[in-house]
């Protein structure tokens, strides 16, 4: 029972439609999220990790377009949901915490109403007293005084606003919470607090998390498994611990070297030479090959596919591994 | 939580999951790859040339401008003198008939396009120039300069233009088209000053401006070299709007008799037609030609403004691609995720 | 509060600029304005009246004395004596005309704002759809069709070709004045065409303004979050997008009153409607400067009051402005 994945992503392809080009932001990626698991997506900015997250929640903004593949949530095909099924899927099964709490709350609506809104949309029969009590409960859960429910977003600090967003995400006890860089816009001390809070809540309620951040250290600490993306493709999936200790893909190795370790000896940090390819002018073969120090001739001709890597129990897409 | 539907366990065949290639997708969405000729133009020009509304508007304007330029050569009669009997029906001799005063309507229309377009462009150009100077100074120099200038920008926005112009024009007896153009510029610069100021404030803190400041560039050089080129589309947008305002307001002022009745413009043509009770006496050919000319010019400028808007705001340009995306999804029995 | 006080201060400043311009314009023009005014009254006056007028118009003494006198008279709503309807004071004529203009402008603004905003919401929500691609450009083009032309067109079509509506005036001649049904119906019936011509040339601006603001807002995270929460489309559209997009439109509404008044002036001329526009035109033709100047002051005042009202409304609707003073 618990082996069945919560979310299955198969060959997911997302395009952005420009004036006279189509950019393939996500090119046929596969991964699973298991119940109760924290799954991380890592990669440089623009690699498509947020695009995957949005597609998963069926929130791709126009002119973006999920042009192929499948997303299955507990076996159901999310992409072909009817309007009504989709509305139910949102928030009560998958909720979202955005990067910028600054813009995630409507500035002219009281925060209480924005939380109650989410509850009422799924429990239309709930009374005002019930929704208000739930909102107050949620506020206490994230350590904000319920007296402030009637305030407007601009009256809270950035960290508090992000807590409100997290409280809101918990409102209907969803099975999956997608967190798209939830702490990037906050200062370091507040970041820590928020992550600890998320860990605590996760332990208490047992939801799965799809976690996206630039901060590899934070991700390794928080997540169970991590997928590494490069130029719209998944290059490696591995248990969080193995990402730094036993990286299989050259890109994962390079990424690991460019982040400071949280503990242990200080090492020299290295950036990755070159920059990611433009999505409208991709190289042939492996997309990382032009920047890869270990590339062999076949890398320039043939795109590698994800294959199991026994060393980590994960998967990686690299010709060097076969 | 409670409403778990029976899970669908059959995996759809892999082929169904495969996305079309980018090339196939472009074909299905009706996107054409950028032609090589087009790719050589600068970015804004590419956007403009591929904008049908903008091109259509520009074409109409071009026709009017050519007619205006050639007016002295192609007018069959002297537009300022009697050319026949009053209210002659349109025909071989008088293409659009004659006015109550016996002047040839077609010749007046062509001659009028000269004055009307000139006034519109003078008003638009001067208003943009004032707006640019005030907006950039206010935005770039900040402090007291900004406070004082912004006060005047807001005053010019808030004061009702037409009543003020009426006072001005009524004391300048029989204002010539040029004078009207300048008066309009003096009352119509507020909008572009405001946009330019906002834009300058945004640009002022960008790296390339800060870098130039650190290198000790002179302020006016920074304005001319770094700031101006980065807001050309806002300047063009302001110019188009001010020109629309200029042409329409000139016609309105002359229509109510504030212009010089001896000049020949679309506005004075309407004024005389109205006074001659052209509609009541069945002389439609005296009143509709200038009316239609004003409507067409206004519409053309609006279309150009649409194109400029889409260039300055990519969100607006993106709307054109949303229809095809919705249809793509509908064919696959799916719907868009987001409005 | 601090915000509103600041705005109030600004409106006083703006009003001062307007009345000063109004004072200076006739005095900076070539020729002696007093003589001009007297010329326009030729034959109507006895010599002692001429003296009286010279005095009331305040064209004697130093510029500074004249200015103080002018302000003093303004403070008492004394706009001088109308030369057209001599010896009626300008003020009574002005307020009579302003009443009718208010009817036109009020009805037209309400309608065009309502229609334009509704269409703007609709076309932003279904942007790129048929309604949006087809009607947005057309409605905005109507905006550039200038009131003169549209009013003439409607006038010709519905009073000459198909005489459905009355030829002019604000109501039937033989009415018992007052607020009875017959009068109101007659007034409404006479206002249909003038109001329609103002609406036709102005609602496109609201359509485009609301549409573009909404399209920009649709890209905001809070709208995406509303969608992610599974709210109904209607609730997202009205409560999360339109609610925010209406704020800047309210500000533009107040600023646009000046333009709408311009349109109303011309419409009144075409439909022979007894509002400010028609009387101002008369005043222009007869060089009744006191009326021309008085209309500017009255309209400036109304526009400033409208702007103040829009500021108050914005403060009520936007919590950010309310606490701006506190922060």
Image (cartoon, coloured by chain):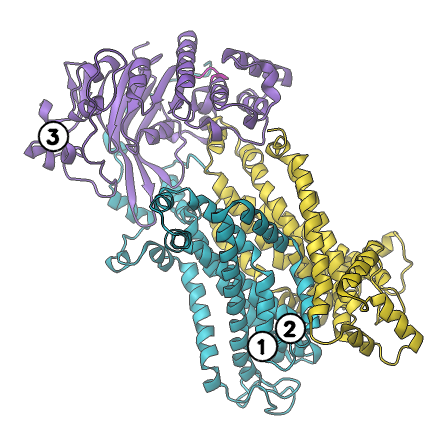
Nearer to me, C300 or B29: C300
Q: Which chain is cyan?
A: B
Q: Which mark is residue B254?
A: 2
On the same chain, marks 3 and 1? The answer is no
The image shows residue C12 at horizontal and vertical percentages of 71, 48
For mark 1, give the secondary structure: loop
Q: Residue at x 89, y 78 (%)?
A: C44
Q: Is residue A173 magenta?
A: yes
User: Tag 1 or tag 2, which sits nearer the N-term?
Assistant: 2
Q: Which chain is purple?
A: A
Q: Neighbour class for label 3 at 10 Å: few (<14), some, many (≥20)?
A: few
- Highlighted magenta segment, given as a residue range: A170-174
The disc placed on residue A293 is 3
Q: Is residue A106 left or right of residue C85?
A: left
Residue B294, position as x, y percentages in the image: 56, 70
* Identity of the residue furthest to the front in this view: C62
Tag 1 subunit: B
Chain C image colour:
yellow
Q: Quadrant of the N terminus of chain B?
A: top left
Asked if B77 appears above or below A67 in the picture, the reply is below
């Amino acid at each position: 029972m618990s082996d069945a994945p919560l979310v299955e992503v198969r060959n997911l392809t997302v395009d952005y439609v420009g004036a006279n080009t189509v950019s393939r932001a996500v090119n046929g990626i596969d991964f699973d999220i298991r119940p109760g698991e924290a799954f991380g997506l890592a990669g440089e900015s623009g690699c498509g990790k947020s695009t995957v997250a949005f597609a998963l929640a069926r929130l791709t903004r126009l002119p973006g377009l999920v042009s192929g593949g499948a997303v299955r949530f507990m076996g159901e095909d999310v992409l072909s949901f009817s309007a009504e099924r989709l509305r139910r899927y949102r928030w009560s099964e998958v909720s979202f915490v955005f990067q910028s709490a600054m813009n995630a709350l409507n500035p002219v609506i009281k925060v209480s109403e924005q939380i109650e809104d989410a509850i009422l949309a799924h429990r239309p029969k709930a009374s005002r007293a019930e929704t208000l009590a739930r909102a107050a409960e949620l506020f206490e859960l994230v350590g904000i005084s319920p007296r402030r429910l009637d305030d407007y977003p601009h009256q809270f600090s950035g960290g508090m606003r992000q807590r409100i967003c997290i409280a809101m995400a918990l409102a209907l006890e969803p099975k999956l919470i997608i967190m798209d860089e939830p702490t990037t816009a906050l200062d370091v001390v507040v970041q820590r607090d928020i992550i600890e809070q998320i860990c605590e809540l996760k332990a208490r309620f047992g939801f799965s998390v799809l976690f996206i951040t630039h901060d590899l250290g934070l991700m390794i600490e928080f997540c169970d498994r991590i997928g590494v993306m490069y130029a719209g493709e998944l290059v490696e999936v591995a248990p969080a611990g193995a990402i730094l200790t036993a990286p299989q893909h050259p890109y994962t190795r390079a990424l690991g070297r460019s982040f400071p370790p949280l503990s242990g000896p200080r090492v020299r940090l290295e950036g990755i030479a070159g920059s990611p390819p433009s999505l409208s002018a991709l190289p042939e073969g492996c997309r990382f090959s032009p920047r890869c120090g270990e590339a062999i001739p076949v890398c320039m001709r043939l795109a590698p596919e994800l294959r199991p890597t026994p060393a980590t129990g994960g998967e990686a897409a690299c010709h060097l591994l076969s | 939580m409670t409403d778990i539907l029976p899970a669908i366990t059959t995996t759809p065949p892999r082929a169904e999951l495969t996305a079309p290639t980018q090339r196939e997708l472009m074909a299905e969405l009706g996107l054409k790859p950028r032609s090589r000729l087009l790719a050589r133009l600068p970015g804004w020009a590419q956007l403009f040339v591929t904008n049908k509304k903008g091109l259509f508007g520009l074409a109409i304007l071009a026709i009017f401008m050519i007619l205006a330029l050639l007016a002295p050569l192609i007018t069959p009669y002297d537009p300022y003198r009697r050319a026949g009997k009053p209210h002659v029906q349109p025909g071989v001799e008088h293409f659009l008939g004659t006015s109550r005063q016996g002047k040839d309507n077609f010749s007046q229309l062509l001659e009028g396009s000269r004055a009307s377009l000139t006034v519109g462009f003078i008003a638009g150009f001067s208003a943009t120039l004032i707006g640019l100077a005030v907006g950039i100074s206010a935005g770039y120099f900040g402090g007291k300069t900004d406070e004082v200038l912004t006060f005047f920008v807001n005053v010019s926005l808030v004061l009702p233009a037409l009543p003020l112009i009426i006072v001005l024009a009524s004391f300048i007896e029989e204002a010539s088209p040029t004078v009207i153009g300048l008066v309009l510029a003096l009352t119509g610069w507020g909008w572009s000053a405001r946009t330019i100021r906002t834009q300058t404030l945004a640009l002022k803190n960008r790296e390339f401006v800060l870098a130039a400041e650190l290198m000790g560039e002179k302020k006016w050089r920074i304005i001319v070299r770094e700031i101006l080129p980065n807001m050309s589309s806002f300047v063009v947008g302001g110019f188009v709007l001010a020109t629309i305002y200029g042409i329409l307001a000139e016609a309105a002022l002359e229509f109510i008799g504030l212009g010089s009745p001896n000049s020949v413009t679309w506005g004075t043509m309407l004024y005389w037609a109205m006074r001659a009770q052209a509609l009541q006496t069945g002389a439609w050919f005296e009143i509709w030609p200038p009316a239609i000319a004003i409507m067409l010019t206004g519409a053309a400028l609006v279309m150009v403004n649409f194109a400029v808007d889409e260039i300055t705001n990519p969100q607006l340009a993106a709307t054109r691609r949303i229809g095809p995306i919705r249809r793509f999804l509908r064919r696959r029995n799916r719907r868009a995720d987001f409005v | 509060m601090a915000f509103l006080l600041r705005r109030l201060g600004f409106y006083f400043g703006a009003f001062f600029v307007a009345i000063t311009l109004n004072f200076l314009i006739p005095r900076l023009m070539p020729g002696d304005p007093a003589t001009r005014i007297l010329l326009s009254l030729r034959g109507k006056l006895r010599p002692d009246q001429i003296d009286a007028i010279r005095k009331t118009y305040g064209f004697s003494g130093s510029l500074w004395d004249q200015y103080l006198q002018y302000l003093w008279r303004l403070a008492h709503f004394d706009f001088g004596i109308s030369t057209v309807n001599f010896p009626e004071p300008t003020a009574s004529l002005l307020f009579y005309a302003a009443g009718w203009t208010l009817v036109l402008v009020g009805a037209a603004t309400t309608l065009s704002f309502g229609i334009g905003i509704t269409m703007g919401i609709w076309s932003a929500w279904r942007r790129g759809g048929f309604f949006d691609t087809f009607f947005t450009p057309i409605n905005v083009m109507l905006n550039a069709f200038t009131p003169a032309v549209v009013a003439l067109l409607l006038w010709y079509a519905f009073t000459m070709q198909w005489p459905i509506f009355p030829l002019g005036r604000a109501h039937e001649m033989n009415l018992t004045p007052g607020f009875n049904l017959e009068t109101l119906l007659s007034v409404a019936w006479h206002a249909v065409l003038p109001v329609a011509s103002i609406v036709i040339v102005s609602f496109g601006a609201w359509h485009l303004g609301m549409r573009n603001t909404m399209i920009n807002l649709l890209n905001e995270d809070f709208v995406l979050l509303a969608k992610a929460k599974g709210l109904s489309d209607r609730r997202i559209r009205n409560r999360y997008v339109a609610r925010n997009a209406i704020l800047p439109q309210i500000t533009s509404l107040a600023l646009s009153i000046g333009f709408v008044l311009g349109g109303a002036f011309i419409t009144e001329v075409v439909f022979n409607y007894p509002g400010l526009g028609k009387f101002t035109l008369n005043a222009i033709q007869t060089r009744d400067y006191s009326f021309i100047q008085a209309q500017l002051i009255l309209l400036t005042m109304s526009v400033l009051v409208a702007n103040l009202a829009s500021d108050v409304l914005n403060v009520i609707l936007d919590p950010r402005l309310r606490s701006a003073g506190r922060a």
